[in-house]
Amino acid sequence: MVMEYIASVKTAWELAKAVKTSADAIDDAQMKLQVAELIGALADARIQAAESSELITSLREQLKSKDEMKFDGEVYYKVKEDKEQDGPFCPTCFDEKGMEIRLHQNRSRASDSRWICKSCNKYFR
Ligand SMILES: [Zn+2]
């Protein structure tokens, strides 16, 4: 289902490009403008389709996973079925995009023990 609408948008995009080639051959400013707008709208649709497909994939992964994300007030830890903890994970990426992004220890200064998310570049604790 996800892949089908991406394919539809791609087909529409290719048709629009073909229409543009035809429209360019006709000296009609109004038509050229409308075709340019159509291509712009389809370009947006392609980006949004790709983004929502990524989100759906990541949400599916989460549904499959039996591991539970626990928020400790600052960051997330994943509690596995065997109760073992994994993490920490970025709270911003998890809350906003549902993405499980592992945090890394910030090593830019020895005195700085904060965690950094390499996806959104935020620091924690
Ligand atoms: Zn993040």
Image (cartoon, grey):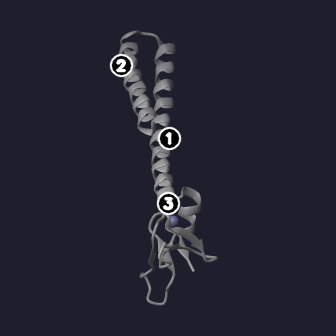
Q: Quadrant of the N terminus?
A: top left
Mark toward the start of the polypeptide (3 vs 2): 2
Mark 3 and mark 1: span between their CA atoms? 17 Å
Mark toward the start of the polypeptide (2 vs 1): 2
Q: Which residue is mark 1?
A: 48
Name the residue rendered at 57%, 65% in the picture: 92
Name the residue rendered at 47%, 20% in the picture: 35
> In this view of the protein, which residue sits in the foreground, 48 or 76?
76
Q: Which residue is mark 2?
A: 18
* Identity, as a three-letter code, of the amino acid under mark 1: Gln
* Identity, as a three-letter code, of the amino acid under mark 3: Met
Mark toward the start of the polypeptide (3 vs 1): 1
Q: Which residue is mark 3?
A: 99
Label 3 or label 1, whichever lies nearer to me, is: 3
Seen in the picture, residue 52 relative to 9 is either above or below; the reply is: below
Considering the numbered disc 2 on the image, is that residue within a helix, a strand or a loop? helix
Mark 3 C-beta closer than 8 Å to ligand 1: yes
> In this view of the protein, which residue sits in the foreground, 7 or 66?
66
User: Mark 3 and 2 residues: CB-CB less than 8 Å, in contact?
Assistant: no
Q: Position of residue 20 (x, y in %)?
A: 39, 19
Q: Position of residue 39 (x, y in %)?
A: 45, 27
Considering the numbered disc 1 on the image, is that residue within a helix, a strand or a loop? helix
> In this view of the protein, which residue sits in the foreground, 59 or 83?
83
